[in-house]
Amino acid sequence: MAKHIFTFLLTVILTLLFVKSGNTQSLSEQTGVIKGKTLLVDSDIPIPGVSVYLQDTNIGAASNGNGNFIIKNVPAGEYTLIASAIGYYTLTEQVIVKENEAVFINFPMIESISSLSEVTVMTSGTGGLKDIPGSVSYLSPKALNKFSYTDINRTLRAVPGVNLQEEDGFGLRPNIGLRGTGTERSSKITIMEDGVLMAPAPYAAPAAYYFPTIGRMQAVEILKGSSQIKYGPYTTGGAINLISTQIPNEFAGRIDMLAGSFGSTNLHASIGNSHKNVAYLAEAYQYGSRGFKELDNGGETGFDKKDYLAKIRVNTNEDAGIYQSLTFKLGHVNEVSNETYLGLTQEDFDKTPYRRYFGSQKDQIITRQTQLSLTHRAEFSKTFNITTTAYRTELGRNWYKLDKVKDDNGTKTGISAILDDPDTYSGAYRIITGGSSSNSDALFVKANNRTYFARGIQTILGFNFDNTTLSQNIDLGLRFHEDQMDRFQWVDEYAMDNGVMKLTKAGIPGTESNRIESARAFASYLQYRLDFGKFSATPGIRYENITLSRRDYGKNDPERTGVDLSERSNHVEVFIPGIGLNYNLNSNFNLFAGVHKGFSPPGSKEGTKPEESVNYELGLRLSKQSLSGEVVLFVNDYSNLLGTDLAAAGGGGTTEMYNAGEVLTKGLEFQLSYDLLSSDTYSSFRLPLSVVYTYTDSKFQNSFESENDSWGKVTAGDDFPYLAHNQFTFIVALEHQKFNINLSGRYTDEMRTVPGQGVIPDNEKTDAFFVLDASANYAVYKNISLFVNSTNLTNKAYLVSRRPAGLRPGMPRAFMFGIKANF
């Protein structure tokens, strides 16, 4: 690892020396100079990395960490000066350059996502962070473009307070938690795309077997703290809002073509334009891989995913008395993944961590997702607007995977138990590793077939009232929502014949799990913000009225006649208050604090109570030119934690929720960013460094016998499973107008895989690991660049999980390279 870091630093030093030596002309030798700053509009916040150049020439520069830029050796004459940066509107300015004189031009940069409605968590980018009551992180288009990750796990490691548990190495089905909520299928956080709920059935079945494609997104907002009550129903940890590619304000497009290790390919293309009263965007994102795991029979272990999106907007003239717009959004995703729940035994993992057994050769998940929305926005005045969105999402997925094995003695065992104790279940282990079976029904492959839909309509009214001493804002939101999960499953039986699985009995659809889970919900919130001098207060309250129900037809009624029908329902009504306070100590520091109620909906089982907690945070923000940072202390005090029986978490897969009692979670979040070359006013280089640290401690406060196989018997004082105490990330880059080189490293503590105390047994923990990623980008022309990245640079083999069944590795070293073009 030290060798790789040394090589990177040597490259940085040699590049600095080379470029500096080629740029030693004195001012007296220059014809003219253009100087200036790039600042966020209506603020003094610098925007670094903006490309400023003279139209139809190769003359230009990039703004540094303080937003300063200087263009030397400009021949006298009249020019069009252009300022361009990823995620910002392109600006132009006419300039006249005279011999031996300097021209000063400042560019007020406007984010291209600022046209989003108030549905989003924030719309003013890094400049708006100081005004949010609570801890907020924002991943800008430039930040996402640095590494061009397709794995949301790698993207979010730059954000403090995020808990991650990897699973497949590609991030296709992530497990994300915020502030210790638990990571299982991201079921305890609110996931949105453009402010619309995006989990398949966010109330009835929140386990997110679908997650929006991160490579298609333009930016990401992560909201924690008191103001997240606007974005329920999950208000304990926080909300993640993924911002899709926005319609450009003029004709523009992009095409990225990348290829790399394990047969990986990535194609991202978009095109769009805005006219006076109509605008459009069309986008395609396709990526796939042969996979990095090695199946015993040599089969495929990768995936193929295709994601398409279209937007059309019609609007009145901008100067209309009441400006209105109507935006239609349509998206469709197809995915085929040769993925399995079957991991490895400890012994096999130690020998060949990327192996896959014969018994998983038939495992595959097929997913199809469609989303559509219609958003109307009316701006009645500068102080009053209404945004209404009607939406619908549909998801169909069938995960066909090995579930149980019958040995030659007729003993039937789940795959998790087999891999935990292969000596006791040696007969079953022999079969999944390719040994021929004497029984024709030795392997039971379950078709986990499910369909989902979610639909609703939400309206947000925004008011603001300003005078010379006070600024007041009121947001009122209403949402009617319903969703459903339909499980219609079956089991096929196979024999193993010298490593080849042969179908011996095809199951009948509807003879395994055969039920419908549904939810209807009305939600509303009212949030008021008062700004008075250096002080601001943001109280708010959310209301949720939810009815959850189940219709179970049983395993003997695939026609759903209702002969064995059982029904149940659960109703919950709750008010969720919160308040955030903010005080600007001076122009660089502000102190914030908040308290709010945490809430997660219960399941349909009668008597199951919702998850409830009281959450506190206290933080300090710093923002001074190229230096910014934040430190936050948080406490989540659960009066009732909800557990869920998920197969993905090592449970039985019933998806039943149950009350798990009191839990206390506390932690620290720290983030600091600084440009190490910012002291050089007009340096053509930037050397930004960002460090992120998260400490999380979560303990059960009472003892109980878990209904979830993955938790077992819990004793008061036990640590919460799959939660790393310490996480640390750094990102450092060398940036120039022509190129950038980036290095990222992440350390993750070992994690318990089951609740416990004291020293963690070797068979109940994941590895502590440190992983390095790197990327580089070189502009061969103004709008065309070459790109390369490497994940897991040192090729470290590490254990990320012991669930769903057996041990699972992280992604080995991989490379991607190709070309990126904008027009």
Image (cartoon, rainbow, N blue to C red):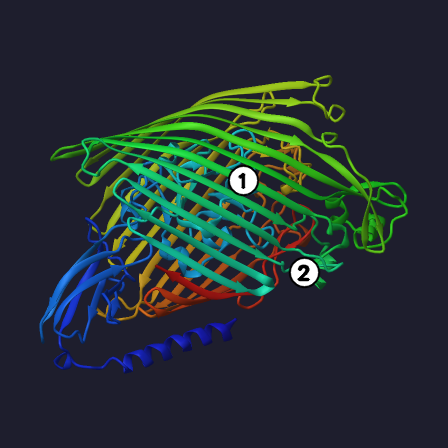
Indicate whether 413 appears above or below 783: above
Residue 436 horizontal side relative to residue 659, left or right: right
Residue 109: percent from the left, percent from the top?
24, 53
Characterize the local packing of mark 2: few (<14), some (14-19) or many (20 or more) Cα atoms within 10 angstroms: many
Q: Earlier in the sequence, mark 1 or mark 2?
A: 2
Residue 289 horizontal side relative to residue 538, left or right: right
Residue 293 horizontal side relative to residue 87, left or right: right
Nearer to me, 521 or 398: 398
- Residue hosting label 1: 369
Nearer to me, 747 or 777: 777
Residue 51: percent from the left, percent from the top?
27, 63
Nearer to me, 417 or 410: 410
Residue 598 makes an appearance in the image: no
Indicate whether 422 appears above or below 467: below
Q: Residue 353 carries which label?
A: 2
Separation of marks 1 and 2 at Cα, in angstroms: 32 Å
Residue 395: percent from the left, percent from the top?
56, 37
